[in-house]
Image (cartoon, helix red, strand yellow):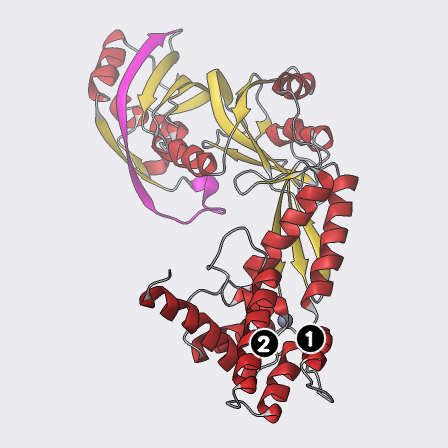
């Protein structure tokens, strides 16, 4: 036996259904969706049809007791939709004008059928194994269903967008064997009811290191005003070969900072994430990826680690700004170098803060600001009377060439200042970038 409270709950659903249908024509699916959170393993159209049949039985009972007029019964039947004509006429309710669904205009079943078929065809054609469905442009339908839910105090409803995504996704899975995947879909099918389907393929992100063995190699292609190339090689050029490997549209590289064109990147290399956009292939062996990257030129070497998620891009970029570096600089000094010059330099640049205004050589591209970076340690070896090598361990973001020459007083203190003689950095290599991803 059901207790009173449970009977009351049943009553509420039934009464709400009858109240709604007295005012609005609704198709099975749109009525059922208002009660989507009730019952499990049911389709909303099943919910809607069940509610309508129980409502019909209840109303029939009232009619028999003389508590409901034929006219009232007739108008509710009209709001159930044309497919209820046989049931209603069996109760003697004739000449009813059946109305289209107030929420979807009677179009929802057809939409579901059409897009299920189209997405399934795309999934099969593109050999997609993990997919996701998105739905756009249902403003009017969404607005009307929300209004009805509010008007009747219903808090068990599901949005039409969510239903379409779920129902179409299920159909596509059943037909194709591909799986819906919220975490890492190979393709996202965006259904725009006004414009049709667009396919988005989430980018592939690969974590790697690069080593730059030569000078005159930029990170991105450097195109001159005349449209030519200023430097024949770039890190990007090698990475762009991956577009065809993954059958993608294009490539973006996200590196942990950037060395100057004339600076070599040696040692353990610099981290970067290679992004392949709109890839049509996904599961490529990373050994092949490494091979393709290294085949491009002998001047660039790549070590490929793993596929990564988007959050790594932010962390890579951040680490470029904050991690410490070790440089090797070949320094030429105007005056003759004495042995105690080297000692003085090493002693002075120990945990020393350097104040730098944006170097003159990049003022055209960057704002004139002051930055403070620390030099932790300098080790030197004299090579000749005017030349020495310095190993410099410092914070990321320090302009090392200016640390050497002082940039006309814009960087202080500098090697030139401490040595008391004009000095400049003839060659520079990055030997180590501390990785903290
Ligand atoms: Zn509807």
Give how far across and how far down residue 32 sits, in percent.
56, 66
Is residue 23 rendered to the left or right of residue 85?
Answer: left
Q: Which mark is residue 295?
A: none
Q: Earlier in the sequence, mark 2 or mark 1?
A: 2
Give how far across and how far down residue 144 sits, in percent.
55, 76
Part of the protein shown in magenta: 360-382
- Label 2 sits on a secondary structure element that is helix
When the figure is inspected, residue 51 is found, relative to residue 124, above or below; the finding is: below
Is residue 281 rendered to the left or right of residue 272?
Answer: right
Instruction: Kindly indicate the quadrant of the structure image that contains residue 376.
Output: top left
Q: Residue at x 69, y 17 (%)?
A: 295
Which residue is more in the foreground, 127 or 78?
78
Look at the image and say whether residue 363 sits in the magenta stretch: yes
Give how far across and how far down residue 237 sits, in percent.
66, 30
Give how far across and how far down residue 71 sits, in percent.
61, 93
Residue 134 visible here: no
Q: Which mark is residue 87?
A: 1
When the figure is inspected, residue 374 is found, relative to residue 102, above or below; the finding is: above
Q: Quadrant of the N terminus?
A: bottom left
- Label 1 sits on a secondary structure element that is helix
The reply to whether discs 2 and 1 touch (Cβ–Cβ < 8 Å) is yes
- Mark 2 is surrounded, within 10 Å at the Cα level, by few (under 14), some (14 to 19) or many (20 or more) other residues, namely many
Which residue is more in the foreground, 285 or 93?
93
Instruction: Check disc 2 and report the residue beneath it.
Output: 56
Q: Quadrant of the C terminus?
A: top left
Q: Quadrant of ligand 1?
A: bottom right
């Amino acid at each position: 036996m059901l207790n009173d409270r449970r009977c009351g709950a049943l009553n509420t659903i039934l009464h709400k259904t009858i109240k709604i249908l007295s005012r609005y024509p609704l198709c099975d699916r749109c009525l059922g969706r208002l009660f989507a959170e009730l019952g499990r393993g049911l389709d909303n159209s099943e919910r809607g049809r069940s509610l309508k049949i129980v409502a019909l039985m209840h109303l029939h009972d009232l009619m028999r007791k003389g508590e409901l007029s034929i006219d009232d019964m007739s108008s509710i039947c009209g709001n159930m939709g044309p497919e209820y004509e046989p049931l209603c006429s069996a109760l003697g309710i004739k000449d009813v004008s059946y109305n289209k669904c107030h929420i979807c205009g009677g179009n929802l079943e057809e939409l579901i059928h059409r897009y299920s078929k189209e997405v399934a065809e795309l999934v099969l054609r593109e050999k997609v194994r993990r997919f996701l469905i998105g739905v756009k442009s249902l403003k009017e339908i969404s607005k009307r269903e929300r209004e009805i839910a509010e008007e009747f105090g219903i808090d068990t409803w599901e949005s039409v967008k969510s239903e379409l995504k779920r129902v179409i996704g299920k159909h596509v899975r059943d037909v194709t064997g591909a799986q819906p995947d919220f975490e890492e879909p190979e393709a996202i099918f965006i259904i725009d009811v006004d414009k049709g389907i667009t396919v988005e393929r989430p980018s592939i992100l690969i974590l790697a290191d690069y080593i730059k063995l030569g000078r005159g190699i930029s990170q991105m292609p450097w195109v001159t005003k005349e449209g030519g190339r200023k430097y024949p090689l770039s890190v990007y050029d090698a990475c762009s070969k991956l577009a065809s490997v993954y059958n993608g549209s294009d490539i973006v590289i996200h590196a942990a900072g950037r060395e100057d064109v004339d600076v070599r990147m040696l040692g353990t290399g610099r981290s970067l994430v290679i992004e392949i956009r709109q890839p049509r292939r996904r599961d490529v062996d990373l050994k092949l990826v490494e091979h393709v990257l290294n085949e491009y030129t002998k001047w660039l070497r790549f070590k490929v680690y793993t596929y990564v998620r988007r959050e790594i891009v932010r962390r890579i970029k951040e680490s470029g700004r904050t991690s410490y570096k070790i440089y090797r600089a070949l320094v030429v000094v105007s005056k003759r170098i004495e042995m105690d010059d080297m000692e003085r330099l090493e002693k002075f640049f120990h945990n020393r803060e350097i104040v730098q205004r944006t170097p003159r050589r990049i003022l055209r591209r960057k704002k004139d600001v002051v930055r403070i970076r620390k030099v932790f340690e300098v080790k030197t070896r004299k090579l000749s009377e005017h030349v020495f090598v310095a190993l410099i361990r410092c914070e990321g973001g320090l302009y090392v060439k200016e640390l050497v020459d002082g940039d006309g007083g814009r960087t202080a203190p500098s090697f030139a200042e401490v040595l008391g003689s004009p000095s400049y950095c003839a060659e520079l290599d990055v030997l180590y970038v501390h990785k903290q991803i």
